[in-house]
Amino acid sequence: MRFSNKEGIAVVHAIIEEILSNKDYLSKVDAAVGDGDHGINMSKGFNMADEEITGSDLNMSEGFLVISKTLISKIGGSMGPLYGNFFRGLSVASKEKEMIDGTVILEMLRKAFSNITLITDASEGDKTLIDVLSPAITAYEINYKNDHNLPDCLKAMTISAKEGLEATKNMVAKVGRGSRLGERTLGHQDAGATSCYLILKTFSESITKIVNANS
């Protein structure tokens, strides 16, 4: 089960659309324990990337690189660099690949995670996007080792990502702006974890759609 890097540009467009359509939701989640601007900032960055990508003959890796560069150079705060490095990882791990299969996707996810850990000390339990990303990648990896059915592996990743997101509601923020509120962050899901879930969910669903269409 595989698809071309060229076909994969649909994945990039799908992720951009998901973030843009959830602008208000992300800001609402952020308002509970943060500045309430997460959706605004993410939407701003992804909209600028969309303007550059639309009409261009880019493949998936190139599209992810555009998102990366835009978020790093145009979006402030912590999310710009974090997601900029995340999407750079997706791009770097796939840029030499004409065809994308389950092994390449695992390399992409690993590189994206590795890139993020270079700029944050956050770990699972700190109420951040790591609480979604780390278990999601682990779920994908375990399922891929046992069964190379790509849609099944991606579904397992999405389920784990959702569980990770829900788990942040029962955590006290230990890093970032939310950490200043301490116990008051209990009962609220993390905004970064929320956007990470949306990105992984859309990543999974859009790839599955391409793979099923090719089968």
Image (cartoon, rainbow, N blue to C red):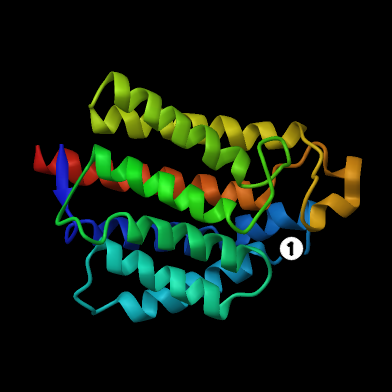
Residue 103 image point, x, y percent:
26, 39
The foreground one among 70 and 27 is 70
Judge whether 110 appears above or below 154 on screen: below
Is 192 on the left-hand or right-hand side of 169?
left
Q: Quadrant of the C terminus?
A: top left
The foreground one among 29 and 86 is 86
- Direction front: furthest residue: 118
State the SS at label 1: loop
Instruction: Say whether residue 80 is visible.
Output: yes
Is 10 on the left-hand or right-hand side of 160?
left
Q: Which residue is at a point 54% across and 69% down the rendered structure image?
A: 43
Instruction: Say whether residue 205 is visible.
Output: no
Which image quarter: residue 66? bottom left
Dot 1 amino acid type: Gly
Q: Which residue is at a point 44% across and 45% down the rendered structure image?
A: 200
Is 153 on the left-hand or right-hand side of 40?
left
Q: Circle 1 is placed at which residue position?
A: 36
Q: Which residue is at a point 50% across and 30% down the rendered structure image?
A: 160
- Direction top: furthest residue: 146
Is 127 on the left-hand or right-hand side of 68?
right
Residue 25 image point, x, y percent:
61, 55
Badge 1: few (under 14), some or many (20 or more) residues near its Cα, within 10 Å?
some
Q: Quadrant of the N terminus?
A: top left
Judge whether 48 appears above or below 186 on screen: below
Which image quarter: residue 82? bottom right
